[in-house]
Amino acid sequence: MLDALFSPGRIAVMADSVGEGTVGRRLVERLVDGGFGGEVVVVCEGGGEVAGRTCVAEVGDAARKVDLALIALEAAGVKRAVGQAARAGAQAVVVASAGFRGTDPTAVELERGLVQECEQQGVGLLGPRSLGVINVHHRMNASGAAALPRPGGISIISQSGAVTVALLSWAARRRLGLAKVVCVGDKAGFSEVDLLKALTADPATTVIVAYLESIQSGRAFMKAAERAARHKPVIVLKAGVTPAGARAAAAHTGQLADANIAYGAAFRRSGVVHALTVEALLDYASAFERTPLPGGDRVAIVTTGGPGVLAADAVDRAGLRVVGGSGSESGDGDGDGGAPVEVSSDASPEQYTAAVDAVMADDDVDAVILALAPHAMAQPLEALRALCQRSADPNKSILASWLGGQELLGQVDDLVRCSLPDYPSPERAVAALKAMFDYAAWRKRPPRIVTRFPVNRRRVERILTHHLRSGQLELSEVRSKEVFRAYNFAVPQGGLATSGDEAVEIAERIGLPVVLKIDSPDIPHKTAAGALRLNLGNPEAVRDAFDLLMLRISQRLPDARVNGVFVEKMGFSGREVLLGMQRDPQFGPMLLFGLGGILVETMEDVSFNLAPITGEEAMQMLQTTRAYELLRGAPGHHGVDLRSIANGLQRISQLATDFPLIAELDISPFIVGDAGAEPYVADARIVLATEAPHG
Amino acid sequence: MLDALFSPGRIAVMADSVGEGTVGRRLVERLVDGGFGGEVVVVCEGGGEVAGRTCVAEVGDAARKVDLALIALEAAGVKRAVGQAARAGAQAVVVASAGFRGTDPTAVELERGLVQECEQQGVGLLGPRSLGVINVHHRMNASGAAALPRPGGISIISQSGAVTVALLSWAARRRLGLAKVVCVGDKAGFSEVDLLKALTADPATTVIVAYLESIQSGRAFMKAAERAARHKPVIVLKAGVTPAGARAAAAHTGQLADANIAYGAAFRRSGVVHALTVEALLDYASAFERTPLPGGDRVAIVTTGGPGVLAADAVDRAGLRVVGGSGSESGDGDGDGGAPVEVSSDASPEQYTAAVDAVMADDDVDAVILALAPHAMAQPLEALRALCQRSADPNKSILASWLGGQELLGQVDDLVRCSLPDYPSPERAVAALKAMFDYAAWRKRPPRIVTRFPVNRRRVERILTHHLRSGQLELSEVRSKEVFRAYNFAVPQGGLATSGDEAVEIAERIGLPVVLKIDSPDIPHKTAAGALRLNLGNPEAVRDAFDLLMLRISQRLPDARVNGVFVEKMGFSGREVLLGMQRDPQFGPMLLFGLGGILVETMEDVSFNLAPITGEEAMQMLQTTRAYELLRGAPGHHGVDLRSIANGLQRISQLATDFPLIAELDISPFIVGDAGAEPYVADARIVLATEAPHG
């Protein structure tokens, strides 16, 4: 079906009319103007002629079978047209028509009918509300876009017609070569995942660019994206991530993980290059298409002055290193950084190319940024022509910023194609280089090995099933701790008391001092509710605490269900951290780590990753918090056992992966001591979902 | 002198030659081509002709006096030329020649000679290494730039020739109108401050744009910028702020405040619009020139689809609010936010303008973003023409993003000037709106009233003078606390003991429990050095602690100078915060605030402001840390007395302003309790400079 979409021999354009100004007419004209080598059959009721072709009334009237139908009819007529097209041989249809979505029930019904018809006929559907499809190497412009783009390796998947034409216009202006362009529209048929897979397998596509407003299945997308990214870069702008409404909702539920974080984590894991602005899409794509990935972070800058200063600032902000130039030897590796290589503005073209050749030949340089303002150069056109022909060695990137000189480049292009990716500003050139650097690091990542720990999975299954049956979705602290104990977390000894005597008895059995806590599913924040007493060292204190807790809770929260008072051995005091998991509706279990207690919320110092995680990824979660320095041990302060925290995160990852019906869990605080001391679960919480999520 | 620079009647161009390809020839040709109304005298040794003018050998040979000389001679000949020009009447010179800076001592000597000559002759100097000066309204292009720009209100100060030509090229392409353009070059004469003052007074200039690589006097710049910003926006890109070297140095000295932070604080205080990329300079300028400041943060978006999603994401990220559209009533004020107003892509130009007029007429809208992709519209040129003529009411901003449609706008422009600021992407349009919003907030700020507290200034003067005389630049904890006590900080009672008996005596006099600390100028970090004992409740404990401290310090740090052991009353325990000041070489005393102890460094949660500060600014310093929520009191936790922290910051501000010779100080920790409890200085440090800084 995708073959018929991308490389049809014969195309039917089905429209209500092909009169002046209609979509149907434009589709036919642009197909023919673009030099499509196959046959174009025009189908319309009213008759008429366009581009030398006379309308037939029925697609079946054409002499031979068609492969693809482009449908630009009123919504109500589309379903019938699909049937006709299928009977005439079409294996795929592109539906440009709108009117299938929104609040109107008729529209929704129309879409359902369209999808059913396509399924029954075995016809692939692109759209509805698709701008169309372009296959440059097949000389097929089935999109109504102004002209067939230049041929090249960049393929585009876009969910918006307006963004598609904007990207086409930019690509033309920046002289970028394209392979395939697909506007998925409302995505009732082919999804972003289908197209991602097709473009992964497409030898003509070297870089994939996607503008997406929604992702249908996060996990399926990740899988397809990761597979693609192993072979070619996948650059994605996910729009619509920050509606004020979503944020407001997140604040109410106290959720730390919002959609942005989930996309960030998913993209990082699967090697997707994450574009945050629409300009970044083609900025990055042109770098990936035209220059090799950098072998490291050492960047040489060749400049006439000011633009080099801007480039150096940008390199520094991106966390890369400036090398070469005066002020330091290149590649001295001491982290001091170098300076841009300055060429006088009245230098000859040969002097510019000599400066570039010198840094390109330098083994201690991984990437070269040309930061030039051509208008300020003595022989700008000649210099641009000479520089444009520089080509990188296979392990060195070279990117150019022609500050203010973009239109000069058009003149160069008449004679020689510029082989360098070029940018309007040094900052944008450096941002593209940074995207390449991160992608190269992902490509070089070690194999992911997820450790599976021996645990008592059966025990957890029993506890959860019991809760589900009784409809109790929130587990009490005591039950939650049983689950964590089954996954080999250390949990202090303890027991549930329903009288003061019993509390003392338990305390003396497990050993003083102890902690007393109200055990109630209705009191998640015990400290705030005054439902907690610490460090009780003798029987009298235990009895007093029991009575006080029961009295207070009956006064303050008379409606709370109270199971009793949990008496627990007081553990050692150490650093409090939080280990948690929240199941993202799109991407599944999202692990989180931060400092414990009130600091988590106020400091916004939390790191995220998607389960399952490896040992390295667990350590990275620690390292990417600002608190890492504190945990590792700043001067004059003990560090804690980092390995044991990472290990805890891995076991939470395993628990969340083993039991999809756990919607949310946290160990807060998890008390960690010096290396060797086994950290323990001081408080914990597990919330179940009513049903396990799909996918 | 600046009059002669900007509006000369007669200009001499002095060059070694005016042959083909020389700077001299280009200067003359461009002046004449630009339609300069005054007279142009060409001076060169070799003779020749250019643009119908014959070279004279000496500027004095010209029939009449000149006002301005443009000098493009070899460096060695420039000084003599200045003398000749001055005698021929020139009140200002523009020196384009390079060769006056760098490591070559001859070059440095040449610059000194040039500056002296200009001073002696009373001639204003622009340069050397200046690209020149343009006054569009005077039709003077004395810069060698390709063409006289369009007339308008944006004036540019630039320190780089390459960046100047790039900005000119962008301005031409974006159809921006300019007033004056000055390239300050090496700034041996006119500085950025001189030009800022001139442009502030210039009625033709409505927006000032500056690209600066260095700022000669931070305080003078702030003063001039603040004065300018009261009348017109000043947009500054400060390049060269992040050399790897500067960062490495900062890490060694443990300085928290780096150059970036200082510039940020200075720009915020003085109302400067801070551009972080070179593209932002003209992005912002065009908004300020073409549309009024927004009256608030409510943004309506008119779109055809995808571009509106991008705009909404950007508005949300900028901290502004999307209003209108379906999904919510506009201006409902409940913070839920609205959605973009969608217009169908095949709508007529009238339908587009109707949608825009509706949001423009809505009292609950402060700004309008048009997020359109013209190529995707049915009648793009007609719609653009109609939209371009929309003008804002005086309290409403309107900005347009023509995604991918920038070249269409050139066609519109042949018929009607587009009155809207326009951007290649929705994200850039929103960034410009955000810059306007922040500037408008600065314009509306309340008057700054710095409180002066009654303090014992004389006492501090005596302590500091004594230390300076003895060359002791680092004050001990005890002395530092005396200084803070003189500025009305609460300091626990205490005394210095040199024997265990004396320690016990002091402890019993001030009351137990006490704290003991080694008093030594060589041990700044007492906790780390083990030079501190807390909470000593009886005489034996005090005596033991004294002996142990003295023993340990003699073992661990035998070379430390030890004054004795300081015995101090143990204060209440509360939240630890840090109040500090570091003197920035450019902008003077930089105050800092953060959570105390190890959290300051690890959390990077510190706020900065320049002294002197007002009460409001002190509170803002608290509010802009993430720790603010914690200090204010999260659910279940006590808050602290915020007012008393702000008050402490104000008194530190006064101390740093009163005594420029204090290079650095900190109170760490400052212990703060509940409202009503007076916070106290638990530890403190003051470092003096060998001499007071200038300016």
Image (cartoon, coloured by chain):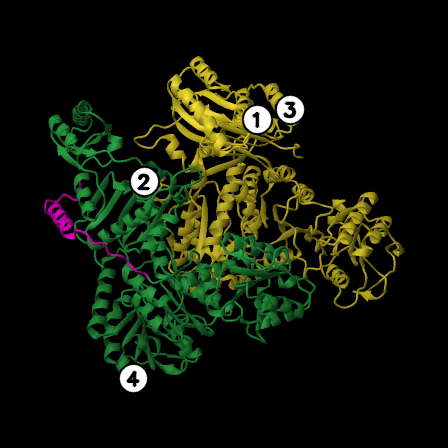
Chain colours: A green, B yellow
Chain letter for the residue marked with disc 1 in the picture:
B
How far apart in space, not on screen, are marks 3 and 2 (Cα)? Answer: 48 Å
Q: In the rendered image of this protein, does residue B166 appear above or below residue B681?
A: below
Bin the neighbour count of mark 3 within 10 Å (Cα to Cα): few under 14, some 14-19, many 20 and up.
Answer: few
Which residue was labeled with disc 1? B655
| Amino acid at the residue labelled 4 | Ala
Does B411 appear above or below B78? Answer: below
Do the residues indicated by labels 3 and 4 lie within the same chain of the protein?
Answer: no
Tell me the CA gap for discs 3 and 4: 103 Å
Tell whether label 2 touches label 3 (CB within 8 Å).
no
Mark in the foreground, 3 or 2: 2
Q: Is residue A173 visible?
A: yes
- Mark 2 chain: A
- What residue does disc 4 label? A62
Which residue matches tag 2?
Answer: A673
Location of residue A83 (image quadrant): bottom left
Spatial CA distance of label 1 from label 4 is 92 Å
Q: Residue at label 3? A: B465
Instruction: Verify CB contact (< 8 Å) between mark 3 and mark 4.
Output: no
**Disc 3/disc 1 C-alpha distance (Å):** 15 Å
Q: Are marks 1 and 2 in contact (CB under 8 Å)?
A: no
First in sequence, mark 3 or 1: give its number.
3
| Region of the chain picked out in magenta, as a range | A448-476
